[in-house]
Amino acid sequence: MIDWLPDMISVHRHGALIYLNRAARQLLAITAAEGWQSGGWNKPGLIERVHPDDLLAIQEQFRRLFEAEGTREVPEVTEVRMRGLDNSWRMCEVSGIIVDIAGVPTVIASARDVTERKRLQAKLMVAERMASLGTLAAGIAHEINNPLAYVAGNLEMTADALESPAPPVSELKTVISDARDGAERIRRIVHDLRWFSRAGDERLGALTVPAVLDAAIRLTANEVRHRAQLVQDIGATPPVFADDSRLTQVFINLLVNAAHALPEGHSDTNRITVRTRTDDQGRAVIEIHDTGRGMAAEVQARAFEPFFTTKDIGEGTGLGLSICHGIVTSLSGQISLDSELGTGTTVRVVLPACADLEPPAPVPAPPVVGTAHAEPGEPHRRRVMVVDDEPRVADTIQRLLKRDYDITVALCGREAIEYIQNGARFDAIVSDVMMPNMTGIELLDELQRLAPEQAHRVIFLSGGAFTAQTRERLAHSGARQLEKPVTAKQLRACLAEITAA
């Protein structure tokens, strides 16, 4: 029976491996007993299949197991990656117990391959995130259309005023200031959307809780506004170690749930309160309270179950709280709720403080090699090439910079390479990332081949929507990066740094 169990079972005595069941032998591609008799968790065999980054965790687990010999506690489970028969890394849940067999302490270890389950969970998280975006779509469109309306209106007023013989300068300044404010509001919303909707591997790092909450609040503003007054009581919290998009997903789900718990038509009396603080253990505590109808005890007991929902068909997937629970617990945090019928609900998220509070060391700028030179007899002006397949974007950057730099515009990567092949050299190359025919990454590759000193001068303007491969290549390119829409101040500061030679 043990030999045919789907879980991998191994038995260890005196540090030696004495038994492997069928599932474990298949993972190790072992067919004969002599192939594994000398192996053990601390000897060649099973241990060599564990990912190097997970070795300490599994060794520590079994060290604690030996220390706790004789206890009858539930076996501790550790997730480790093990190399499978096809040479891929499989995520396994490993646990072990010590039993006496003929008076000899014997370790029985089990490992369960949860790779497919993890993949399904990741897909469900993305599906739930996209479902959340679908729920918020109308509200987000409203949040963008409001500032867009006065950006467009103020630009039209500016155009009309400039046609008059003596345009009122003070009024023009106000109009342009309002337009810039609207553009900045749109930029923040788009940034939050890209942050939240990003799919792919986790990118864990130190995050400030208020910044993540602000993004979630902006994205759910319209959903909340029509149902309740939002009250923010933001106290000091320590940084937490998390993935920004997934933590944003938690707060968005909780805010939307709070809004949907409130009846429509009473936005002046309904309240949603977002509160943060630090508890006596130094952990970050985030509470979202609504004054809605509350939950009965039997509903609370099932609230975090997958696919359980009290909403009507088509209004909820039943995955929101379950996914929140999975994300928070994966961060070694806790999520709980307090609710009573007629008095509302409070959902509480507790996250441990980030162990490493020191900011990451700045990445050193790539070396600046050589400069372009002005013609003899002319004052020196730095030369910048702008590469973007959108002519209006390229023209806008040219207008922002032409006062201080000599600008050359290339509307594709191949045109930029032609300038280089014809002997042109630039103090900086400002390039879009996603372009047809030749991407910014491919342009950088060509520059490294044709003119390595020019490759060190590339500044990427990234608009997001990258494939996982592009994101990885961009991260390892060593080039400076700015996020669209970029401000003139940001662009000039980056150019000043790269051209200072």
Image (spheres, rainbow, N blue to C red):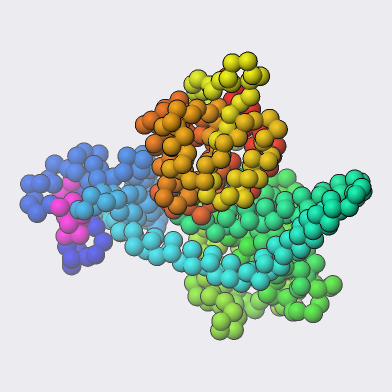
| Image quadrant in which the N terminus is located | bottom left
In this rendered view, identify the residue nearer to me: 453 or 193.
453
Residue under the point 36% across and 31% down:
449
Q: Is residue 137 above or below residue 179?
A: below
Q: Determine if the magenta segment contains residue 18.
A: yes
Please state the horizontal and vertical placement of residue 488, each as a whole percent of the image.
69, 39
The part of the chain drawn in magenta is 15-29
Residue under the point 61% across and 26% down:
382
Say if residue 232 shows up in the picture: no
Please state the horizontal and vertical placement of residue 163, each as a whole percent of the image.
84, 53
Judged left or right of residue 474, residue 495 is right
Please state the horizontal and vertical placement of residue 347, each as a whole percent of the image.
65, 64
In this rendered view, identify the residue nearer to me: 170 or 349.
170
Residue under the point 64% across and 30% down:
405
Q: Is residue 225 above or below residue 370?
A: below
| Image quadrant in which the C terminus is located | top right
